[in-house]
Amino acid sequence: MVIVQEKNKELIKEDTKYEGRDKAYLDIDRMINEGLSGGTVHIRQNGTNIEESHVLENEEPPYEAK
């Protein structure tokens, strides 16, 4: 049982190594999704505070300490 748990821990660690950060720039994605106004979407002066979609740039994997 201990070996299985250790194996599962390794699988979890490998599975969540970058938590998706190797595929998208999540800091900007988070700002877009949550909105800079606390997650509230509203219309002012013929425009919304959050647009329909944004292009996310490809990036290098995150820094990994050795």
Image (spheres, grey):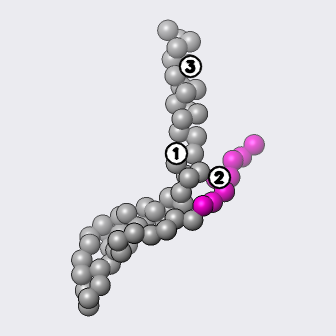
Q: Which label belongs to residue 19?
A: 1
Q: Position of residue 46 (x, y in %)?
A: 26, 88
Q: Which residue is mark 3?
A: 7
Give residue 51's quadrant in the image: bottom left
Give residue 34's quadrant in the image: bottom left
In depth, the one of 24 and 62 nearer the eye is: 24
Residue at the spot 26% in from the left edge and 70% down from the top edge: 40
Q: Which residues are magenta?
A: 58-66
| Mark 1 in CB contact with mark 2 (< 8 angstroms) | no
Q: Callout 1: helix, strand or loop?
A: loop
Q: Residues within 10 Å of mark 3 (few under 14, many from 20)?
A: few
Q: Which residue is mark 2?
A: 61
Q: Residue furthest top?
A: 1
Quarter containing the C terminus = top right
Q: Earlier in the sequence, mark 1 or mark 3?
A: 3
Where is 31 relative to 65, above or below? below
Q: Which label belongs to residue 63?
A: none
| Mark 1 in CB contact with mark 3 (< 8 angstroms) | no
Q: Callout 3: helix, strand or loop?
A: helix
Residue at the spot 54% in from the left edge and 35% down from the top edge: 15
Q: Residue furthest bottom?
A: 45
